[in-house]
Amino acid sequence: MTEKLKKSLLYTYGIGDLCFTLLVCMEVYFFTLFLTDYAKFSMFTGNVIVYATGIGDIVFAFLAGVVLQRVSFKFGGKYRSWLIIAPPLVVVLFLFQFSKVGSESLAAAIIIIGFLVSHLFWNVGYGAIGGLMGSITQNSDERTILSSSRAQGQSAGNLLFSFTGAKMVPIFTAGIGLVYGFSVTILIFGIVMILGYLYLYKMSANTKAAESETSPAETVAPDKKSVGEMVGLVFKNPPLLFLILGETFRNTCLFFILSFAAYYFNNVLRNEGFLWIFILGNGIGTLLGAFASPWIGVKIGKRHAYGLACIISGLVYFSVAFIDTNSWSFTIIFTIAAMIACASQAMVGALFVDTSVYGEWKTGKNILGFTMSMMMLPIKFGLLIGRGIIITGLAMIGYIGGAEPTPEVANGIRTIMVYAPAITSILAAIIFYAGYRIKDTDIQRMQNEIVAK
């Protein structure tokens, strides 16, 4: 019988995600807006940057999985070591993503390179937290709590950003320039991220189930599986494939809302200053949902917690189509939807660990590190699809950054804002339920059979 994890680790496991989310929010809320309204790139160049970074980011997510699975260091453990290696690299490289140096083409190239290389290391760091979660406990309930703790951290980070980043960016850009204001904000949040990952590194040092203590040889010897073999094992894992596909549309919904909200408040509600209240409401909603998620996940199981949350939140988003909203009513409705949707977000880490167990049970080969890095794929696809909807949608309705919106443009933005989240959220649930059939009781049985082999 494995020793239970300390509550201090179980319930603060999301600290690293909390600090990392501050940087994520910078990208989600401001990257597209930075390109169109701050750096003032042309719509053509903006499209090139969005699609180049989106497609490249997917490739780099695969590369991060290979790095996480095959590269090991002689200190800290296979996953823990990345918690102190990745964050400083992320911060330095992330600065180039929000820059404008030289001609438009040169500036675009620098942004694309900075984006892709910084995301390589943040993919590795994010996957390392997931891999560590799968290696320190085999208890399904503990994994649910750890996964929910990550969601709580992400939600708290989003809430903290509403009080900090959403206000810091306007202040700094007004004081020191439209571009350099982002650099200062990123440096501040970057230091916080480094400290958050360092905290998790310290907190997980004494876990008796940690790889650094139970499997010291693995921290030295590299994994011999080829890239082709690891990819092949993923395709032999149907629950993982359906989870990735469902997660892609769930993340499309999430990131679309966060990225498009500024356009909606600026051009439809004509209340630019209310955006930070929307961000605050979204943060409060997701945080409340994250705190309720451990109980929901343990009570009805991770599978139903995930699927039902996607369906119900999608219906709440769709309700906006039948209401003549103002800033407050729109924010309240989307806050309620965010609270419900967070139950699905809270299950994701544990669901990916379960697919890794299923894969090892089915094939006899463990690719936990590569599997956990696959958590980033649906995020990348979701960001790409979400940004694609935004950029393409804005071009189709004739949007021009900084120009007074016509009634047709405003109506187009409202239509996009209502239907895109509802459709993608419900589609995520349909796909997930169609192919993910693993129950929590199945995982315990599979783990016992793996040990018995």
Image: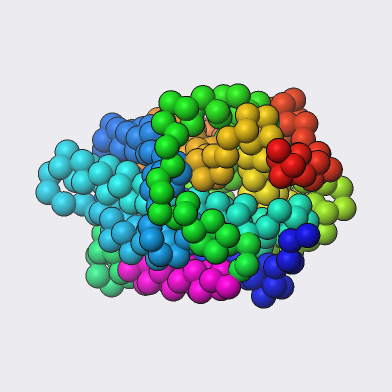
- Expressed as whole percent of the image width and height from the top left, the position of residue 419 reads 64, 33
Q: Which residues are magenta?
A: 185-206
- Expressed as whole percent of the image width and height from the top left, the position of residue 299 reads 87, 53
What is the quadrant of the N terminus in the image? bottom right
* In the image, residue 195 lies in the stretch drawn in magenta: yes
Out of 205 and 95, give the one closest to the viewer: 205
- Expressed as whole percent of the image width and height from the top left, the position of residue 296 reads 82, 54
Q: Is residue 316 visible?
A: no
Image position of 247 with respect to 344: above or below:
above
* In the image, residue 51 lies in the stretch drawn in magenta: no
- The residue shown at (81%, 41%) is 445
Out of 60 and 427, give the one closest to the viewer: 60
Out of 125 and 213, give the one closest to the viewer: 213
| Rendering quarter of residue 247 | top right
What is the quadrant of the C terminus in the image? top right
Q: Is residue 198 visible?
A: yes
- Expressed as whole percent of the image width and height from the top left, the position of residue 284 reads 67, 64
- The residue shown at (71%, 73%) is 7
- The residue shown at (41%, 49%) is 221
